[in-house]
Image (cartoon, rainbow, N blue to C red):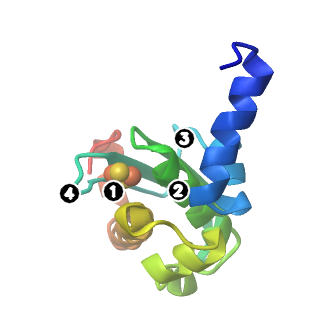
Amino acid sequence: MSSDPDDLRAIIMGDARKMYSETVIDHAMHPRNLGEMQIFDGFARITGPCGDTMEVWLKVRDNKITDIAFMTDGCGTSIASGSMMTELAKGRGINVAIRICQQDVLEALGGLPEESQHCALLAADTLKAAIRDCIALQKEPWKKAYRKYQV
Ligand code: FES
């Protein structure tokens, strides 16, 4: 077996391509909108049944998502799912984005193996929770002053 790093990388990527679409690999390797926000209009943190956590921050103007960020301590497919979820939500109205579901994320990624499909659910559920948080803060904006990151 070769010890050349380029050969090893080619072998690993070859194996990954047998399981994942090019879109999944691209979003896992180059996640969009990865990071945190200090100033935001909505935030959620959800831990899925697998024990992995995702966080989503939103900036909203005129009920439209103008910026979005996510973080996760999960696997590569949760990174790809979070990344794709942010791409689907950015620029959308919150009443449209709140309907983004697991299936939407899966379809946009070109599918995931069955054992990884819950990663797309975690991404969609965290987005919904962040939008619900934004709506709650719109109703009671004074609560923003008493919050940091916690949900
Ligand atoms: Fe838990 Fe991916 S395995 S989110």
Disc 4 element = loop
Q: Amino acid at mark 2?
A: Gly
Q: Callout 3, which amino acid?
A: Met
Judged from the image, the secondary structure of the residue bearing numbered disc 3 is: loop
- Determine crowd level at label 1: few under 14, some 14-19, many 20+ residues with C-alpha closer than 10 A: few
Decide: few, some or many residues near mark 2? Use Cα within 10 Å; few <14, some 14-19, many ≥20: many
Depth check: give the residue in front, 91 or 100.
100
Q: Residues within 10 Å of mark 3 (few under 14, many from 20)?
A: some
Please state the horizontal and vertical placement of residue 104, each as a whole percent of the image. Answer: 55, 81
* Label 4, ligand 1: CB separation under 8 Å: yes
Left or right for 50, reference 93? left
Q: What residue sits right under mark 3 in the picture?
A: 37
96 relative position to 99: left or right:
right
Answer with mark 4 or mark 2, whichever residue precedes in sequence: 4
Q: Which residue is mark 2?
A: 82
Q: Which residue is mark 4?
A: 49
Closer to us: 27 or 25: 25
Q: CA distance from mark 2 to mark 1?
A: 29 Å
**Residue 28 appears at what percent x and percent y?**
62, 47
Q: Secondary structure at mark 1?
A: helix
Numbered disc in front, either 1 or 3: 3
Q: Residue at x 50, y 53 (%)?
A: 77
Q: Which residue is mark 1?
A: 142
Q: How far, Cα to Cα, is label 1 from label 3?
A: 19 Å
Cβ–Cβ under 8 Å for marks 2 and 1: no
